[in-house]
Image (cartoon, grey):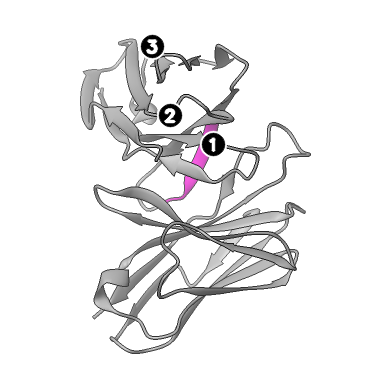
């Protein structure tokens, strides 16, 4: 059974720092991996999706990497801003059905 | 207007009552999903549907039922609500023919069962 773990559960950094959020999964036979952002009281917003054949994806200040063999993905946020404060969730898709298995998230606080 | 709309956004009910959460989407996606989110447990899949005639159970379907009334509408029902169904419920859509097939979520329905 696929299990997804995110470490740390919470992170507080000063504005301007570069930071890395980690996601690990137990079954390397994945279809894709997605990173989401969730603001308090809001739904999830898709940030990046990495297909199993890809090593990384970039969008603006965000860069997500995928290492299937080691069961790991990282989300790199450059030059963090207070507006980046949110919970970040990674989710693994084991097949074309898009039945995602979610981690429990990392709560990020960027201090001004 | 949101592409994925959930109603109600908040609901407080009593044990044993029947509750329906509704989801509608304007994205034209075939696939729709219902998840619940609990503190410390992340999101878990309740039911999913690939089209009006194709409905499938997720990992935690007991105590829930769904109806796909049209391509754009997918409802989740709790026939007899119980307190451990208190959670934040999300509807999501996707279409592997569009973009990378990522999921798009509604803003959630917070349900409290007393």
Instruction: Locate residue A32 relative to residue A82 in the image: left or right.
Output: right
Q: Could you tell me which chain the residue with mark 2 belongs to? A: A
Q: Who comes first in sequence, dot 3 or dot 2?
A: 2
Does the magenta portion include A17? no
Write down the residue under mark 3.
A79
Check the image and report above or below for A18 versus A43: above
Q: Who comes first in sequence, dot 1 or dot 3?
A: 3
Residue A94's mark? 1
Q: Give coordinates of residue A88: x percent, y percent.
A: 38, 33
Kindly report which numbered mark, 1 or 3, lies closer to the viewer in this rendering: 1
Residue B1 showing in the rendered view: no
| Residue drawn where x is 52% and y is 31% of the image | A34
Q: CA distance from mark 2 to mark 1?
A: 9 Å
Instruction: Locate residue A76 relative to residue A7 in the image: left or right.
Output: right
Q: Nearer the viewer, residue B47 or B112?
A: B47
| Residue drawn where x is 29% and y is 49% of the image | B41
Q: Could you tell me which chain the residue with mark 3 belongs to? A: A
Q: Quadrant of the C terminus of chain A?
A: top left
Instruction: Locate residue A86 relative to residue B26 in the image: left or right.
Output: left
Q: CA distance from mark 3 to mark 2?
A: 32 Å
- SS type, badge 3: loop
Check the image and report above or below for A50 versus B90: above
Write down the residue under mark 2.
A27
| 2 and 1 marks in contact (CB < 8 Å) | yes
Q: Give coordinates of residue B11: x percent, y percent.
A: 38, 76
């Amino acid at each position: 059974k696929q299990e997804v773990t995110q470490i740390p559960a919470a992170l507080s950094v000063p504005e301007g720092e570069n930071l890395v959020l980690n996601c690990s999964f137990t079954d390397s036979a994945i279809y894709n991996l997605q990173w989401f952002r969730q603001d308090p009281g809001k739904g999830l917003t898709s940030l990046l999706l990495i297909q199993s054949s890809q090593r990384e994806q970039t969008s603006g200040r965000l860069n997500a990497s995928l290492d299937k063999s080691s069961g790991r993905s990282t989300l790199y946020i450059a030059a963090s801003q207070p507006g980046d404060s949110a919970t970040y969730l990674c989710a693994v898709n084991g097949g074309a059905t898009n039945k995602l298995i979610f981690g429990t998230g990392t709560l990020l606080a960027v201090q001004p | 207007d949101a592409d994925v709309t959930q109603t109600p956004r908040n609901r407080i009910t009593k044990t044993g009552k029947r509750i329906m959460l509704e989801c509608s989407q304007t994205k034209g996606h075939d696939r729709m999903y219902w998840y619940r989110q609990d503190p410390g447990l992340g999101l878990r899949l309740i039911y999913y549907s690939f089209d009006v005639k194709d409905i499938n159970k997720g990992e935690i379907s007991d105590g829930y039922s769904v109806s796909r009334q049209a391509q754009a509408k997918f409802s989740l029902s709790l026939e007899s609500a119980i307190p451990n169904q208190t959670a934040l419920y999300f509807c999501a859509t996707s279409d592997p023919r569009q973009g990378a097939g990522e999921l798009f979520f509604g803003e959630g329905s917070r349900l409290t069962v007393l």
